[in-house]
Amino acid sequence: MPLSLEIVTPDRRAYQGTADCVNLPTDMGSIGVLPGHIPLTAVIAAGEVVVTLGGKVTRLAIDSGFVRIVSDKVSVVTEAAIDEAKIDLRAIEQAEERARLAVEAARGQKEIDPVEIAKMEQILRFAAVQRLVKGRTSSGLTD
């Protein structure tokens, strides 16, 4: 019986489907999830999710969040997620530039809003993860 995988962001359901195996980045290292996995709740680190179904591999870039595994259901809640096929390097560069400009503007202010800084850090972190995932697939690197 395959796993049921769902990856949800604040904006949308980024992925929903079945899988034979799911590899997830956690704060304690990468974990592989197969059917029959023990129940688990863990902190997800920004990184690459690898979904395998019938020999086909799908890769997603995700930001930090949480995973909950119960029975054969894997539920991921994350700040951001995107399928590697949809990663647009030009859009990443534009987002990074906007974040850098915002950080530079914030440096000139006496009081810096920590929420805005956290948003910019999240944008830069997720851009780096997307570059990593896209670079692995476009260069032919795989697990």
Image (spheres, grey):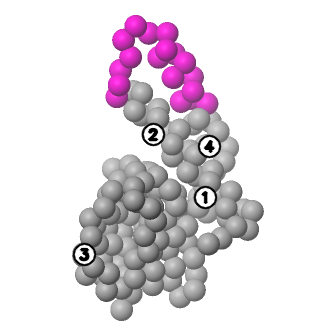
Pointers 3 and 4 in contact (CB under 8 A)? no
Is residue 9 depicted above or below 41 in this figure? above
User: Could you tell me which secondary element the residue under label 3 belongs to?
Assistant: loop
Disc 2/disc 3 C-alpha distance (Å): 29 Å
Disc 3/disc 4 C-alpha distance (Å): 38 Å
Q: Which residue is mark 1?
A: 133
Q: Residues within 10 Å of mark 3 (few under 14, many from 20)?
A: few
* Residue 103 appears in view: yes
Identity, as a three-letter code, of the amino acid under mark 4: Ala
Q: Residue at x 58, y 81 (%)?
A: 56
Identity, as a three-letter code, of the amino acid under mark 1: Val
Q: Which residue is mark 2?
A: 122
Is residue 1 depicted above or below 6 in this figure? below
Tell me the quarter of the picture where residue 86 sits: bottom right
Task: Say which label, 3 or 4, has the lower sequence index.
Answer: 3
The answer to if 101 sits in the magenta stretch is yes
The percent position of residue 139, horizontal first and vertical second, equals 75, 62
